[in-house]
């Protein structure tokens, strides 16, 4: 049998990023957390935590954390079926998921909020580029993810959600200043673009499609969908914006497409661990239903 108090200490250190904060969360001393993890590492025969700032799990540590997440979901489901197991009421369990920022800012957050309002969960959301959220699932850090990958990691299922449509837009003044002679490789190489972070390849992909070759784009980095829109409205740069997020600005004319009728559609998929959990199944049903309403069919 696994030592579940030790697993809980491991998960707390990984979640909180340090032994001290994990101890506060578990209402024990840091030495108790350290001892539990050391004993678990001795039993497993390998390191489970990289003692860094912040602390992070090794590959084996992540698999154990994911196992604990699954067990907690199953225990909560059992408590619901057998109330005598939970005389103080059903405890909320952590449900870690990963999602791209644009989905979170548009259709995913309301779905997650509606689910969390009814289920006994504490949602832990990790935000990353849609081409990288699958890594969070593969590593065991989360139990489910909105991802751009159709192929699921081992032990997971994958369902298509639909495509999110992006438009390359800027303010009319920005277009007049930087693209008066048209949009091409030369003008794109000079006009500042907007990117979410160094993983964001949407602007480069759109430019390659328009110019039929790679264009090195000057860029501002803004890790927020809302800041992306604000920056574009203020004339800071051009960028690929989710159509759903800028629909009102397109109607008012405060944002315009750089090249009409050149959308970039990004396929999205819902991947989740094959855990026999009614909670995870319920979240999956709500996510698939919301995506059907919000996204374009693949």
Image (cartoon, rainbow, N blue to C red):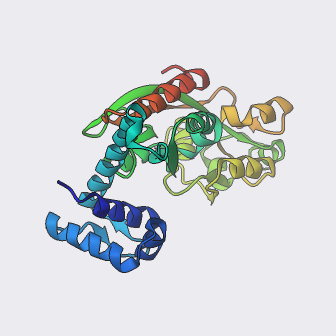
Residue 149 location, quadrant: top left
Q: Position of residue 103 (x, y in %)?
A: 58, 38
Residue 270 appears in the rendering: no
Location of the N terminus by quadrant is bottom left
Name the residue located 57 percent from the left edge and 46 percent from the top edge. 101
Q: Position of residue 208 (x, y in %)?
A: 52, 41
Which residue is outermost to the bottom? 31
Q: Would you say 254 lies left or right of 8 here?
A: right
Q: Is residue 132 above or below residue 13?
A: above
Q: Position of residue 291 (x, y in %)?
A: 55, 26
Out of 3 and 247, give the one closest to the viewer. Answer: 3
Residue 77 appears in the rendering: yes
Out of 277 and 203, give the one closest to the viewer. Answer: 277
Out of 7 and 66, give the one closest to the viewer. Answer: 7
Q: How many marks?
A: 0
Name the residue located 82 percent from the left edge and 29 percent from the top edge. 251
Q: Is residue 181 above or below residue 243?
A: below
Residue 165 location, quadrant: top right
Q: Position of residue 146 (x, y in %)?
A: 47, 38
Name the residue located 79 percent from the left edge and 51 percent from the top edge. 235
Out of 276 and 150, give the one closest to the viewer. Answer: 276
Name the residue located 36 percent from the left edge and 30 percent from the top edge. 158
Q: Is residue 63 above or below residue 147?
A: below
């Amino acid at each position: 049998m696994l030592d579940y108090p030790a697993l809980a200490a491991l998960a707390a250190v990984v979640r909180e990023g340090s032994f001290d904060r994990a101890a506060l969360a578990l209402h024990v001393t840091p030495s108790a957390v350290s001892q539990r993890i050391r004993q678990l590492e001795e039993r497993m025969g390998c390191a489970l935590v990289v003692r860094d700032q912040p602390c992070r799990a090794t590959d084996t540590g992540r698999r154990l954390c994911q196992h604990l997440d699954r067990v907690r979901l199953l225990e909560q489901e059992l408590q619901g079926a057998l109330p005598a197991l939970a005389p103080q009421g059903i405890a909320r369990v952590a449900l870690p998921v990963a999602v791209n920022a644009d989905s979170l800012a548009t259709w995913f957050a309301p779905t997650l909020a509606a689910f969390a309002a009814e289920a006994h969960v504490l949602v832990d959301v990790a935000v990353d580029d849609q081409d990288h959220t699958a890594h969070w699932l593969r590593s065991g850090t989360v139990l489910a993810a909105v991802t751009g990958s159709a192929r699921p990691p081992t032990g997971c299922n994958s369902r298509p959600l639909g495509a999110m449509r992006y438009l390359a837009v800027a303010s009319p003044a920005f277009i007049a200043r930087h693209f008066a002679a048209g949009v091409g490789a030369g003008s794109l190489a000079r006009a500042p673009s907007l990117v979410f972070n160094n993983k964001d390849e949407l602007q480069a992909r759109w430019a390659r499609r328009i110019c039929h070759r790679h264009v090195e784009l000057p860029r501002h980095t803004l890790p927020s969908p809302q800041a992306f829109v604000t920056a574009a409205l203020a004339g800071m740069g051009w960028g690929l914006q989710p159509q759903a997020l800028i629909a009102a600005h397109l109607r008012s004319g405060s944002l315009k497409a750089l090249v009409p009728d050149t959308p970039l559609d990004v396929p999205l998929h819902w991947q989740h661990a094959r855990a026999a959990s009614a909670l995870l199944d319920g979240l999956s049903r709500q996510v698939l239903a919301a995506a059907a309403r919000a996204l374009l069919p693949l």
